[in-house]
Amino acid sequence: MTDVTVETLVADTRPDGAGAETFAPVLPVDLRVMGLAKSFAGMSVFSDVSFGLSRGEAVAIVGANGTGKSTLLRCLMGLIPVDAGSIDVVGTDVRSASNSGLRAMRAQIGLVSQKHNLVPRLSVLSNVVQGLLGQKPGLRHWSQSLAPATSRAAAMSALQKVGLAHLAQRRADRLSGGQSQRVAIARALVGQPRILIADEPTASLDPAAGEDVMDLFFDLARQEGVTVIFISHNIDHALKYGDRILGLANGGMPLDARAASLTAEQLRGLYD
Amino acid sequence: MAFLGYAAAIVIILWSFAGAGFSIDKVVSSPPRFADFLNRAFPPNLEPQVLARLGWKMLETLQIALAGAVVGIILSVPVALLAARGLIAPTWINQIVRTGLGFIRAVPDIAWALVFVVAVGLGPFAGMLAIAIDTIGFCGRFFADDMEAADKGPSESLTATGARKLDVVACATIPAAMPAFISTSLFATEKAVRSSTILGLVGAGGIGIELKVGFDLFDYPTAMTVILMIAVVVISIEYLSGWARTKIIGVVR
């Protein structure tokens, strides 16, 4: 615990002074964003976004369409450049990092996206094995048949966790929506990331399958002690699964509060 | 303004007809001459030894087409990786490679055959090289377009795991573009068969030489046999490639 106090102090001295209330006092910080601004072709998406995430925290990002939720996540991973501000993810300064620095940072992140984004013509197991490419680059992790036994075992164990070990050899485009999203979760978990990022993970699923996927996702995240950021348009999901809720609106982040202190009514206000 | 545009278009088209030596007299006088040719060409020459000779030449033609197309398709993949925007190479390299591919396509296959006859001598190898380079011009460009158009989702997800660009391309972009690659490759093979039938005209192997000799010696029945043989083979290859496309990709694109 001794190595964490400096991080915590820094986190608590955010310019808006909101840190002390929102951060758990002794946990290290996995992610810190200050004064972030992003625009596309001169149209500002957001102009001043600041927040931090402690280890093991689950944070929901909510906000109406066009407030830049997905853009924010892509900025955090360094997938798109930002206009201003600073982003620090697991100790990497995303804006100034080299390509290899960015890859090392991303290797500690698992991403689950709305459209699952599996490679359709490959087997389920190959898709999960490819989740290890960040840590083990090269030919041997291109497909299950080339992968070393340890990687195949890791992928099988990730599939077991999502309850789909029996479908390991099925082609990814022959899965139902719920199964395909579980495989995407296995792929995100196989590299044992420190941060899991989920962009509307249930948007393409029916309500029952969506509920199952969210339960599974958070069970696994909590078991592994992973920090989670997820975007949700479902206010109930945000309140149920998030420890903390961040709300984007009008180019900023007017809401940053513990989920327990919020009601569904208050959150709906963000969408007006 | 629109009127001026139409008027200019009509003037240019008429000017082109003049340049092409269009002549009503010749159009009117051609049917009897054409009938005369058909009269002298039919029945086609079906003597067994002629058929055997032409059959072997046709086989050589298909070998030239297949070998050239396969080499061209394989070499097109790395070329296309460099030509595709936003994949592994910076924009200036994309531009240079795309310009090079444009140049290859701009030079007709028969001109490539002439160049390779000079470089490697008369014979089918020159034809194979001409087909290979022609295929690179075609597939290199379309493979690159196919990869640019491929679904970006899987590649973004792999990039987000920290994978290197080359790994992302191999694992997500190429598999996503694979149906389009197969379709393009089958078209390239059809195109190679059509091209290879004519390369013999400049001494680059295949059945084209028989066509030239037939016309040069006024042996129209044999020339007619060659033309019919080419038609049968080209149409069969088109059917075969259509069938393979449906079989491999599932639906006709």
Image (cartoon, coloured by chain):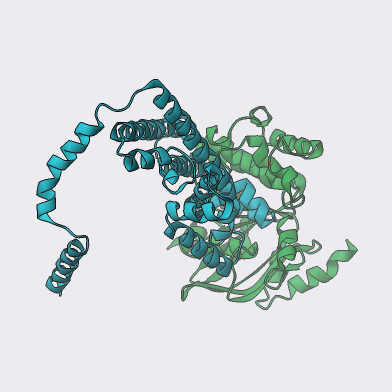
Q: How many marks?
A: 0
Q: Residue furthest front?
A: B217
Which chain wears cyan? B
Image coordinates of residue B215 in percent, x first then y, are 32, 41
| Residue found at the very far right of the displayed protein | A2
Look at 45% across and 28% down and name the residue there.
B53
Q: Quadrant of residue B79?
A: bottom right
* Residue nearest the observer in this picture, B235 or A246: B235
Image quarter (top left, top right, bottom left or bottom right) of the N terminus of chain B: bottom left
Seen in the picture, residue B10 relative to B193 is either above or below; the reply is below
- Does the rendering let one see residue A24? yes
Residue at 75%, 43% (x, y): give it: A140
What residue do we see at 40% from left, 37% from top?
B210
Residue B230 drawn at (x, y percent): 37, 35
Query: Which of the two residues, B191 or A52, is positioned nearer the viewer here?
Result: B191
Residue farthest to the top, as pictured: B48
Question: Could you tell whether A27 is left or right of B106 in the image?
Answer: right
- Left or right: residue B203 versus residue A98 is left
Q: Quadrant of residue B226?
A: top left
Asked if residue B18 lies left or right of residue B97, the reply is left
Nearer to us in this view, B25 or A228: B25
Residue A117 visible in image:
no
Drawing shade for chain A: green
Split into 4 quadrants, where in the image is the C terminus of chain B? top left
Please provide percent x and percent y for residue B61.
47, 37
Q: Position of residue A269 (x, y in %)?
A: 47, 62
Left or right: residue B74 compared with residue A154:
left
